[in-house]
Image: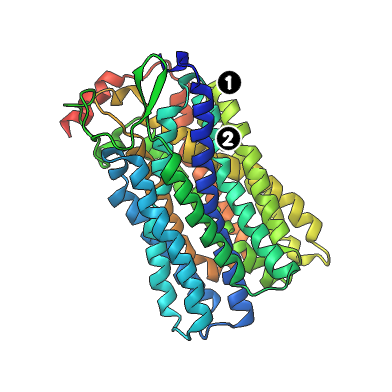
Amino acid sequence: MLNEIPGIKNERIKQFALCYTLYIMVHCCRSTWSYASGLIIEQNKIEGFSPQFLGYVNFTFLLSMGVSYFLLGQLGDKMNPKLFVILGTYPLSALFIILALIFEFTTAPKELYLVLLLLAGMFSSTAWPGLLSIMNAWMPKEQKVIILGLFASCINVGNIAGFANSGITIEICDLSILTPIYISGGLLFFMTIMFHIFIKPRPSIVSEHIISDTSQEPQVSKEVVGVKKLKIWKAWLLPGVAIYALAFGCIKAISMIVGLWLPAYLDYLHVSFVALINIMLDLGAGFGGVIVCYLGVKYQKRATIIVPLLWLGTILMVAINFLKDYDNPFGGYMALNFGVGLFIGGCYNNVAAAIAVELSNNKALKKYKHATSTVTSLIMGYGTLFGALNQIVVPYVKDYLFLYCGILAVIGGLLLIVVILTEWKVDDEPDKLNKEIEMH
C-alpha cells in the first residue's frame, strides 16, 4: 500500500539522505579523534599520554558505548526514534568541541580525557540503532537488504571525511591538530539540526495521497496496542542472533583496532601519507559492504559468503604485518588496506546493518513490534564490548597489529560455520521458537 502512494520514492530518498549524512558526521568525529590522538602521542602534547594510556582511553570509549547499547538500545523501539537519535548526537557534537577547548586553553590532566571519552561513548550509542529503526520503517521490503548495504557505507564515508578533514587541515594547511576536531564537531551539530527539523521517523498514511510526519504522534497508537516489546535478553534466543553477535564481536574488534590504532601504528613506523592509507581502507569497506549484501540477497547464503571473505582478508592482514620490513612500503599499504577494507570491512557493514535488520524482522518476532533497535543494540553492544577489551591488548602487540587482527578474523569465521550448516537446511521452525521465547 505504501509503495502506491505518489511521491513515496522521493520521500524515501529524502529520509535516506538525512540518516546517511547524519551518521557520516558521527563517524567523521570519531575518525578525526583517531587521527588527532596519534599526533598527541607523537608530539607529546599531554604529559603521560602514551600508547598504553591511549589504549585505556579507547577502552573507556568502547566500554561505555557497548554498555550503553545494552542499557539504552531498547528505548529506540519504545520511544520516538528521531528523539532517541538526537538525544545522543546533540551532546556528542558539543562534547567534541568542549574536548578541543579544554585541550587548547587548559592544562587538564590526562585522566579528564577518560571522562570525556566515556561520555562520548554513551552519547554515540543512540545513533546507529535509531537510524536503522527509521530505515527499516521506510525502505521497501523487496529492496531493503541492498539499500541497507548501501546505507552502511556511511560509516566508511564518515571515516574518509574525518581523515580527509584531518589530512587537509593538519598535513596540507599546517593548522593546529585541534582544527579538524572543531570542524567535525560543528558539522555534526549542524547536521543534527537538519535531521531534527526534516526527518520523519515512520511513514503514516492518513489519506490516499498524504504521508504524515509521525514525530509528534503518541507512542502507543491503535495499531500497536497490546503488542509486546522485545526484551534485549530474549533477543539472544532468535535464530542466528547469538552466533552472529559472537562472530561480529571479532569483526567489530578488528574494525575498532584498525580504525582507532592504524594512524598511530603508521606514525610509529614513520609511514607517510597516513590519512590517504586510512581512506583506502574505508573505500574498500564501502564497496565491499554493497557487494557482500548483493551476493547475500542473490544466493540467500549470508554466512557462506562472509566466512571465505573474512579469511581472504586474514591473508592480506598477515601480508601487511610484514610490510614494515621494506624500505618503501607506501604502495603496499595502499593496496593491501583497500583489500582488507573490501573483505573484512564489507563483512562488518553487512552484519552491522543488513543482517541486523533481517534478524529483527524474523518470523519468530511476529508477536513483537519495532524490534530493530533492540536486536541491533544487542549485536552492536556485544561487538563493541569485545572490541573494548581488545583496546587494552593492542599496545602490547603493536608490532604485530595486523597479525593479531588476522587471528580474530579466523575465529569469527569459525564461529559462523555453525550458521553455514543451518543455511543449507530446508526450513526453520519459527512457531516453535516463538513458543520458546515466550516460555522465557
Q: Nearer the viewer, residue 159 or 351?
A: 159
Quadrant in which the N terminus appears: top left
Which of disc 2 and disc 1 is earlier in sequence?
Answer: 2
Q: Amino acid at mark 2?
A: Leu
* Percent x, y of residue 355: 46, 33
Q: Residues within 10 Å of mark 1 (few under 14, many from 20)?
A: few
Q: Is residue 148 above or below residue 117?
A: above
Which label belongs to residue 165? Answer: none
Q: Nearer the viewer, residue 7 or 176?
A: 7
Mark pair 1, 2: CA separation:
16 Å
* Residue 257 seen in the current view: no
Q: Nearer the viewer, residue 18 or 156?
A: 18
* Residue 156 seen in the current view: yes
* Percent x, y of residue 272: 76, 67
Q: Amino acid at mark 1?
A: Lys
232 displayed left or right of 309: left
Q: Is residue 164 above or below residue 396?
A: above
The residue at which mark 2 appears reads as: 150
Which label belongs to residue 298? Answer: 1
Q: Secondary structure at mark 1?
A: helix
Q: Which label sits in the foreground, 1 or 2?
A: 2
* Percent x, y of residue 42: 63, 78
